[in-house]
Each structure stands twice: as structure tokens, then as C-alpha cells.
Amino acid sequence: MQAATKVSERTATAASGSPVTILAFSGDIASTSKDAIMQAYHGLDGSVAKVLLDFTSVDYVNSSGIAIIIQVLLEASKSGGRTIGIFGLSPHFNKVFTMVGVAKYASMSPDEGTALAGL
Amino acid sequence: MKSGSCVEVRIPSELGFEKVGMSTGASMAKLMGFSADRIEDLKTAIAEACINAIEHGNQLNDSLSVYVVLSKNEDALEVKVIDDGAGIIEPPATPDMDRKMLGEEDPRGMGMFLIQALVDEAEWHQGPPGKSFVRLVIRLDKEKE
């Protein structure tokens, strides 16, 4: 019953000039998203230092989905401090992510331009 | 819509159907005049309550249903999410992001915290026999604050 999660990968350049990999999500972000998200994250080249998670095309996120994002942050932290940023969340989910503490470990931006400017 | 108006939805114990309860709650809150941001809060609270009922209360048993009962009071919307589980004896601790990032706490376990944070009242009840439920309330007077 969950809308399948799709993850697409693209690259961009931060305002600082450094390369950024963007993982763009669509569909629901829920417990059923784990394989799609973790496989995409694990598939990133080891040299990737800055990653943005794009929620622009996501309509529904629940606590199980947030837990998967926390798993990404945990793995990034363990693997030598890869920087993770988040953009494109609705104002409501921006509030929810902040409430549970995600904003302490990932920058939160309204859109891609703002996110790239901050990296 | 009259005070006392009530809507009841029965959903299967299958993840994803929480969105049916969530959407019904959102429709009722909109009819009552709640603002868009309060409706978003309610949607997440109902979804998390239904997920808990499906996963923990009914343990994903597809022969059991979860009931979402929405009641309009004079100045509030009350939502009861009822399952066939034993209920919660003690609410879990507030999630600690720092401990999660150290791998000392399960990344999951945020649902009840979100429910409590997003609605005006949240209570977990055991009973009637063989059942348990969570009761959520959002109040229209909070709209003016």
C-alpha cells in the first residue's frame, strides 16, 4: 500500500566549487523505503564527500522513514564525516525533522539553490 | 457539521493503510475549520497512531482491523485509534538524536513522541477487554494563539 520509493542520482556544484551528489527521492518515505534508499547510498563512490537528499517530490514521510534517514546520517558520520544536507521538505516535515533532532546532524534548506549555497 | 458528529473508519492491519485514516482525519478537520498547518500536524499524529496499532497492537495480523473513530465536539476534534493489542504500560523515553547517532539507541521509536508533540492531548488506554486505544485531541481554540 505504500507508494514505491524511487531514488535518482545527479551531480551539482556547491557555491564553494566542490562537487555535490544529490539523491532525489520520490514516492513515500516509510519502512518500505529502506532498500531503495540504503542501496542508493551504499552505491555512492567512496570519494563523494558532500551529499544532498532531495525531498521535493516526496508527499508522505513517517517516523520509520525518518529512521532510515537517521541511518544514512549515522553511516555518513562513521565513514569519516561525509557531509549530508537535506532540502525540499514541506514546512510541516521540516518542523518534524527538526523536532526529532535531524537538523543537528544535517543542514536543512528549503530548496536546491539554498542547499548548494551553504555547502 | 453538528457537534457530536462521528465518523468511523476500519482499516486492515497492513502498513500503508494508515494513510486512509490520516486522510479521513484531515477531511474532518478541514470541515471543522482547522488551519492547514494544524491539519498537517493531525495527519502525522493519526498516521503514527495507526502505524503503532498496525505494527505493535495488531502485530501486522491481517485478520485484525484498526478502527479510527473521529468525533467532533464543540471546540475540538477527538480521534481514537483502536487495536486488539494489550496497550502501552509505560510510554517510551523521548528520542535522543545524539544517542541514535552514536548507535546507542534504535533509530526508530519516534512515533509516540511525535504524536504527543503534534496534538493538544494524547492518552494511551488499555481496554475494553482485548482492546487498547490512543485518544488524540486537537482544539479549535488553539487556532487563535
Image: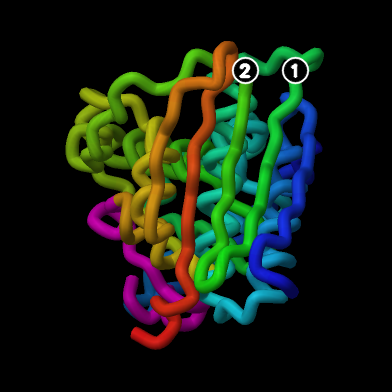
Q: Nearer the viewer, residue B123 or A21?
A: B123
| Chain of the residue that carries numbered disc 2 in the rendered image | B
What sort of colour scheme is used for the picture? rainbow
Amino acid type of the residue that numbered disc 1 sits on in the rendered structure? Leu
Horizontal side of residue A29 vs B141, given as left or right: right
- The quadrant holding residue B106 is top left
- Asked whether the viewer can see residue A117, the reply is yes
Question: Going 41% across and 58% down the picture, which residue do you hit?
Answer: B118
Please rate how many residues cluster around mark 1, counting C-alpha atoms within 10 Å: few if below 14, some from 14 to 19, many from 20: some
Q: Secondary structure at mark 1?
A: loop
Query: Compared to B140, does A74 lie above or below?
Result: above
In space, the residues marked 1 and 2 are separated at their CA atoms by 7 Å
Determine if the magenta segment contains residue A113.
Answer: yes
Please rate how many residues cluster around mark 2, counting C-alpha atoms within 10 Å: few if below 14, some from 14 to 19, many from 20: many
- In percent of width and height, residue B81 lies at 60, 38
* Numbered range of the magenta stretch: A101-119
Q: Nearer the viewer, residue B65 or B1?
A: B1
Mark 1, residue position: B64
The C terminus of chain B appears in which quarter of the rendering? Answer: bottom left
Horizontal side of residue B102 vs A24, given as left or right: left
- The quadrant holding residue A77 is top left
Question: Going 57% across and 64% down the picture, which residue do you hit?
Answer: B73
- In percent of width and height, residue A88 lies at 54, 70
Q: Nearer the viewer, residue A41 or A25?
A: A25
Q: Residue furthest bottom?
A: B144
Amino acid type of the residue that numbered disc 2 sits on in the rendered structure? Asp
Determine if the magenta segment contains residue A79.
Answer: no
Mark 2, residue position: B84
